Structures are given as structure tokens and as C-alpha cells.
Image (cartoon, grey):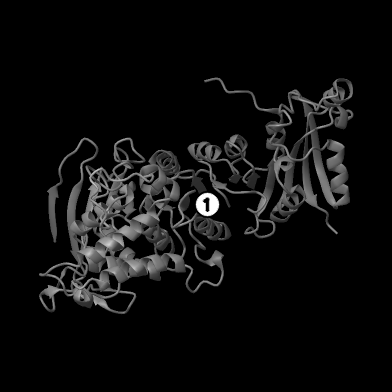
Amino acid sequence: MEATHLATINQAVQAIEKHFTFGSPPEELPLESGEKLVPITLAYETYGELNAQKSNAILVLHALSGDAHAGGANGWWDSLIGPGKGLDTNKYFVICSNVIGGCQGSTGPSSTNPKTDKPYATDFPLVTIGDMVNAQVHLIDHLGIEKLLSVIGGSMGGMQVLQWMVSYPGRIRSAIPIATTLKHTPQQIAFNEVGRQAIMADPNWKKGHYYGSKVPAKGLAVARMIGHITYMSDASMAEKFGRRLKEDKEPFKFSAEFEVEGYLRYRGDNFVKRFDANSYLYITKAIDYFNIVNGNKNLGDIFSGLKAKVLVISFKSDWLYPSYQSQEIVKACKLAGVDTTYCEISSTYGHDAFLLETEQETQLIKHFLNTASNGHNGGAQ
Amino acid sequence: MKQAPLKADHKIILNWISKGASVLDLGCGDGELIALLIKEKQVHAQGIELNENSIQRCVAQGLSVFQQDIDTGLSEYADNSFDYVILNQTLQQVKKPDFALNEALRVGKKVIVSLPNFVQASARFQIFFKGRVPVTKALPYEWYDTPNLHFLGIADFMDYCQKRNIQIQNSAFIRKNGVVKLFPNLFAEVGLFVCTKQVS
């Protein structure tokens, strides 16, 4: 089943928007929880052309609030995707799909449950990062791609990259996990839990069954505000807002007075227009459950046998996914004898740096992909 | 494009390393040496370097590098993980050279050390006659901006190896791109050594 139309054309790169549906019985996708999801639709976009050997495909994996619209006008990684950019669409065929559990075209809690003809809401099964990746493999199969040139993503996108390295090592030639972690830590889970509590405390949430009535806008907006604080750094906030007061501030009644307050409220309110509160609950849970170390007693067992080249990137001011967590990934790669490069980029943007500090990032990625696509470079061991 | 002539120290290291070997370069800088070793000897090379800009330049050449501190970066490697570990103009700049060399000897079957000779003739001359800390072609830094933390001569390093039961299998001494055969501790600007653990 396919619906194709050309997205708005911009000078940067032309995005092709598509939907791919699979998993009708008997091809249901078993989830890690043991439940099944049928059918599954993935919304995805592609940029550039797949070559005849089908050897130039790169899968871009999005973070918590991202979607399939990575490239092109207003794409969340437009700075990296396009002709001559880090993911050069003159050379590579770039794919990005919305994760399952999401709300931007892929099957998620706001989708219609075929059994009830109503939105799933909280009847939607628990999904994991592993489930998201398993669904992506169906899409890659559907596109006829045997081996991806690379998988790349930051934050939760980076977790999916790590999952690809573990679950489908034979289907990737390289991997680029950015600003991410082998397992979610208590501090990271704690921030997500505060966001979830804000949503569930909103009287409009109604245990998730709010479709067709008022959405839990306040709760979701507060969740997004907390998120934004953790994505920035002390320095980037000081630089962006200082202690400046809003120009249009009203007389003191706890309205937004400082610029930072106005910014957070604006970001929160805007988020509600494009994101589903239940998806926020499900995806943050998937992130919190993420632990690629899992049954492995030794760090070195996680990536053992992986032939793909790996580029790990972290950012100095990222305190949500601090560099030591990327260094753990590097350690695991080292122990497994994986050909790895690691760079900690200087930036004051905090966790958001993977979306904003693109000049350094672009150079690293561009050269790394050059090497990965040219085959042998004499990498370690 | 005309190729720059090989640096004398690189030439010596190139001759010492066998084809297809695995190499770990500690403090690999811009990756000039490992790029050369990959091209000429098809080695499998990994670099470790602290400087972010150097990492960028290594990646631009297609090299695999970790941005890490040598003082802590080797613990994950098993014993004898590499055929060669290289400390090219690095050992005098690490915080704990004793520890770093020990770790290098643990993870490498052979360790190649290249050191500036702080007691060569012109340095001695400057100290003795000028009463100043020497600044020479091979030691170009002023006291306030030097990356070097430890100051040693060729004889100091050889004494140290003897004391620590480190075997020096091979050595070479150079000044101004020429080989020094006589009195290296006095005349050589750079000393290069192939070290191994003493077999007991």
C-alpha cells in the first residue's frame, strides 16, 4: 500500500513523502512485550536517489519529538541533509521514518485500533527502541536495500543506531551514534517521569482517552518546557535570555516576565499543536526502558563481531547525555575491536548541540561517510 | 603535486614496522604518521589524540581516532592487543610517563618511543654559556608555553629502561635529518627506540 506525493519543493532538497503499511496477518510484527501490532504504517521521507547497486542508502533516526521530515524546508535536520551538506543528497539516498508509537503519520496511540474503530489511546501496546528498529527493517526490506551505508541519529535517534548495531550488525556498513547512551540513567528517567506526571495530572488527559475532546494541552506543554530546559545549557540560556524581561510583560501576576519564561511557554504551547500527549508518554517510556547492555555481563560482548565502522560524537556542554556516556559506547566498541572514531565537539548549546552545532558535526560526518563508502581505510584490528 | 620529503623520524619508524601490522599511535596529532604507515605498510591503525582540531584533521584523512587522554585511555585494551604502540614525541608530554609506558608495553607487543633529547650539545651550550633554559630547533618552546612536562636525555631514557627491565631492541638517533652514530646523548636531537617487556 503506498501513497506518494511530492512535498513542497525548496531550494535545499526535495523531500519525497510516503507511507508504507505492513504487518497484516500473517506478517504481524511481534513486539518485545509479546503483544502484536497489526497493521503498522510507517510515514517516511526520502531525499536523493538510490543508486543501481542500492549501496548509498543512509537511514536517519529521529529523537523524542522528531518526525520523518528531517530534510527540506523546516526539516529538523535540514542543516545536515541536502546537496553538498553532511549527508550529501547528490551522493546519498537519505531515508527518515517516523517511529512507531509516534504521532506524525506512523502507527501510534492516536491511530485507529482496527478492533474497536477508535483511537488506541492507552490500549496501544508498550513499544521499545528495539520495536522501532524492527519496524524500520521492514521498511528497508520494502525499499529493496540489503545493506545500509549508514545509520545516524542523536539522542533517542542514537539509541536506535546502537540498537541497529546490536540487532542488525550485518545490515549496516557504518553507524553514527550522537549524544546518546548505552542505557538510560536514573537522572534521565527522572526528567522523563516529571514530564509524564505533568501530562497525567492534566484533568483533560482522562487516562489517555481524550481523543475527540479537549487535549491535555497544559500537561504536554509543561512536559515540553522541562524537556527544553534539559536540552539547553547554563551558558546557552544565559547567552540567549540573560535576565532580560519581556517587553510586553504585564503587571505582576505570575505572568511570564523573564524572556526565558516567555520562551518556554511559547515552546510548550507550540509543541501541543504538533504532538500527541499519549505519544509523549509512550516514547519517553521506550527511551527509559532502553538498555543495550542488558544481559551482557561484559561491556565487550555488546558489539562483538560488529564489522561496521563507527563514529561516536558527543558535545562538551551536554549535561543530559554527558560525554562520559559516549565514552562508555567507545569503550564497548574498543573492547569488541570495532573500528571506531570518537570526537567530543566543543559547544555551549548543551544537548541541543547535535541539532545546532552542525559545522563541526558536518565535517566529521562528511569525511567519515567518505571513508565508509570507499571501503577499506586500514582501520584498527 | 610534489610530495614533501619524508621526515627522518618517520622514515625510521616506517622501516621498523612490518607490513599489515596493527598499530596504536598515542598522541597521533594530525595523523601524518599513521596515514603514512597505512599507505606504505598497509597497517591497521588506531590513533588516540586529545586535541579536537587534530581529530577533525585525522577524520578528514579517513583515519580512526579516539579523542582521549593517554593517561587513562588504554585500560580497555587486552594485553598484546597491538603489534606496535607508538609514542612519537608524546611520552615527555603525558602526566604520568611511567604509567603510560607501562600501559603501552602491556597492550603492545613492541613499543616505539621517540623523544626529544633535552641535553644535546646546543642545549648544554645555552645553559652553560647563556645561563638560559635552552630554546633550539628541536626544542622550540619557551618555558612558559611548552607542552613538555618532563625533560630527559637519551641516556636518561636508557638508564630508565634498564632500571625498569625494559628491553631496547633497536634504536636510532638523528639530528637535522641526518643519522647520529657517535655520542648520541651529546649530538642527537631525537632518539628513537623499539622497546619490549623483558622476557624473564
- Viewer can see residue A323: yes
Pinpoint residue B1: horizontal percent, then vertical percent: 52, 20
Residue at figure coordinates x 28%, y 48% from the top left: A76
- Say what amino acid the circle numbered 1 marks: Asp
Residue A51 lies left or right of residue A298; in this view the side is left
Q: Is residue A220 above or below residue A261?
A: below
Residue that sits furthest to the front in the current view: A251
Q: Is residue A219 above or below residue B126?
A: below
Query: Which residue position is annotated with label 1?
Result: A339
Q: Is residue A137 above or below residue B84?
A: below
Pinpoint residue A113: horizontal percent, then vertical percent: 15, 74
- Viewer can see residue A286: no
Report the quarter where the N terminus of chain A lies: bottom left
Q: Splitting the image into 4 quarters, where does residue A212 fall?
A: bottom left
Residue B54 lies left or right of residue B78; in this view the side is left
Circle 1 packing at 10 Å, graded few (<14), some (14-19), many (20+), is: many
Please tell me which residue lies in front, A40 or A306: A40
Pinpoint residue B36: horizontal percent, then vertical percent: 60, 35
Residue A144 lies left or right of residue A19; in this view the side is right
Helix, strand or loop status at disc 1: loop
* Subunit ID for the residue under disc 1: A
Q: Splitting the image into 4 quarters, where does residue B139 fall?
A: top right
Q: Splitting the image into 4 quarters, where does residue A147 fall?
A: bottom left
Please tell me which residue lies in front, A113 or A209: A209
Residue A143 lies left or right of residue A324; in this view the side is left
Residue at figure coordinates x 89%, y 24% from the top left: B128
Pinpoint residue B143: horizontal percent, then vertical percent: 74, 31
